[in-house]
Amino acid sequence: MPDIAPGASATVTVTLTAPGTASGALRVNAVYTAADGRRAHYGTVVTAPVSTVTGTVVGTPPTRDVVANPYRVGETLPYTLRVTNSSQTAVDMVPTESNLEVGFAPPSRPNYHWLGLAAGGAYNCYPSHVLTAEDIARGWFLPTATFQVTATGDTSNTRTLSLGATLVPLRDPAAVEATASIEGSRADAGRDLAANPYAVGEQVPYQFRVTSTSPFATTVAPTAGDLRPLVPPGSGNCRWSNLAAFGSYTCTTPRHPVTQEERDRGFFWATSTWSVTATGRRASTYEVDGGEVDVVVRAPALAGAQSVELVDANGDRYASVGEQVVVTTTVGNPGNVALDDLDAAAAGIDQHTLAIGASVTGQRSITLTQADLDAGRVNVPALDVTATNGEKPMATTIEAVEFALDVKPPKPTTEPPLVRVDWDTMTPAIDLGTARKYSRGATVALHGLEYGQWYYLHLAKDGQRIGWFFPELDDTITFVLPADVPNGATAVTVLDASGELVSFAKIVVNPR
């Protein structure tokens, strides 16, 4: 301290050493002694540095020979937690979350909530877990627990403590699988496949995200896959030895060269096989299906049409009962990718693939019935056709077709009135091409009568009715002169179905 003149003052710096238990505001009493022995007392409040609260949570698993006595579904797994306050002040310990669900956190009773735990204090917790089928199948249980530790009376001084747990085996460790999660995905998500599709031979970048789901070190290695590089021992392979418990990594080296078939299909299947191994554990194998990886913007399409044609078996140019109509179905692929699993069997098509722009044709027959002829048409129903492009289903409905039947006109059921003609003075509208003379019972051929309608014949001299006739395909009608026809000149008169005169032919009946 310097000498101080009467009425003067001086400023001095005093270093205080706080005790190890000091925290927050403290009152300090200072005693000042002059050279002549006189003393002065002065008290002041100082603030000691507040240390951050801290602590530990340590677990102790039960002791059990799980090879000889494995755990069963529904059993209770007991566990011991030792909670320690490592702070220099009293704290409140509040359990917050745990998979040791029985008797851990409020409001259950008992629980392990401790208010005002003294500095350096500790206590034990005894929560437990009821084992599930999933736990037993996994073969191990990894306890988790968290506590919120807060300085008593100072809610701003807080932190979370977590259990550093060790694995609890539930059955023979040698029978427990080493496991992992492996997911593949294309590594060119930013590529615009519409503007920049892949060409044959181009390399598609691919990646795998591998995450260990085992609480022990594992070795993860691909063993097969249509990607290069991928499989050890080549450079850039995706193997990882001694992967830490629950560790993960991403492998971005694989590539896939696009083939012509894949370019036509529009995608490739990203499949691979992986093994996961660990010392003293059972190995596991994973078939990783990355799904369909597009190399173009796929626009699959399916189209079709039906046409119908009569098979005129008797050659009369008309549909008849028992004859058939043939339905021809054409199915095409107007899309930009090839199609598989084509199902058009109902159309008589047994082909199951369609290349880009290709089409296939099938036929089936329908036998005509009297009902079809009466209706004058055949209704060919719509037809559903399906196909796939990978996992993309395609379907189209080929429109129904109504096919009109050309049916022979029915024979008239009544006879028309007779029409008288003067064969000596009238000129026939059609030269029927008859001979000059005929005898009774002779066959008379009339020519030039258009096929497709019924004609009525009678003899003009005596009005004898011959009947209804339908021409042959060469536009000819033949009939036999009745045995009782009178001798002499007469005319064969031809009427149409409405009774109108079509033409006539003069003939002479000669008795010899």
Image (cartoon, grey):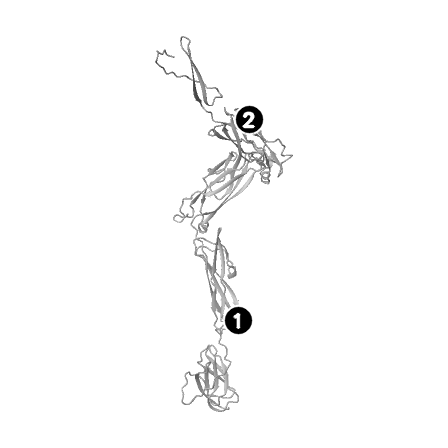
Q: Is residue 444 above or below residue 90?
A: below
Residue 466 appears in the rendering: yes
Q: Is residue 272 above or below residue 37?
A: below
Are there few (<14), some (14-19), or many (20+) residues within 10 Å of tag 2? some
Judged from this view, the residue extending furthest toward the right is 68
- Which of the two labelled residues, at mark 2 and mark 1, occupies the earlier sequence position? 2
Number of labels in the image equals: 2
Q: Nearer the viewer, mark 2 or mark 1?
A: 2
Tell me how far mark 2 sits from mark 1, CA to CA.
99 Å
* Residue topped by disc 2: 122
Q: Which mark is residue 181?
A: none
Q: Position of residue 443 (x, y in %)?
A: 50, 84
Q: Nearer the viewer, residue 82 or 103?
A: 103
Residue 313 appears in the rendering: no
Task: Look at the numbered discs 2 and 1 and tell me whether their residues touch, using CB distance below 8 Å.
Answer: no
Tell me the element at label 1: helix
Tell me the element at label 2: strand
Callout 2 amino acid? Ala
Tell me what residue is drawn at x 52 percent, y 61 percent.
346
Q: Position of residue 295 (x, y in %)?
A: 43, 48
Callout 1 amino acid? Ala
Are there few (<14), some (14-19), or many (20+) residues within 10 Å of tag 1? few
Q: Is residue 358 above or below residue 1?
A: below
Q: Position of residue 403 (x, y in %)?
A: 47, 68
Q: Does residue 61 appear left or right of residue 347 in this picture?
A: right
Q: Which of the 4 quarters of the picture holds residue 206? A: top left
Q: Position of residue 329 (x, y in %)?
A: 48, 62
Q: Is residue 489 above or below residue 145?
A: below
Assign the N terminus to one quadrant of the image: top left
* Residue topped by disc 1: 371
Q: Does residue 270 appear left or right of residue 78 in this picture?
A: left
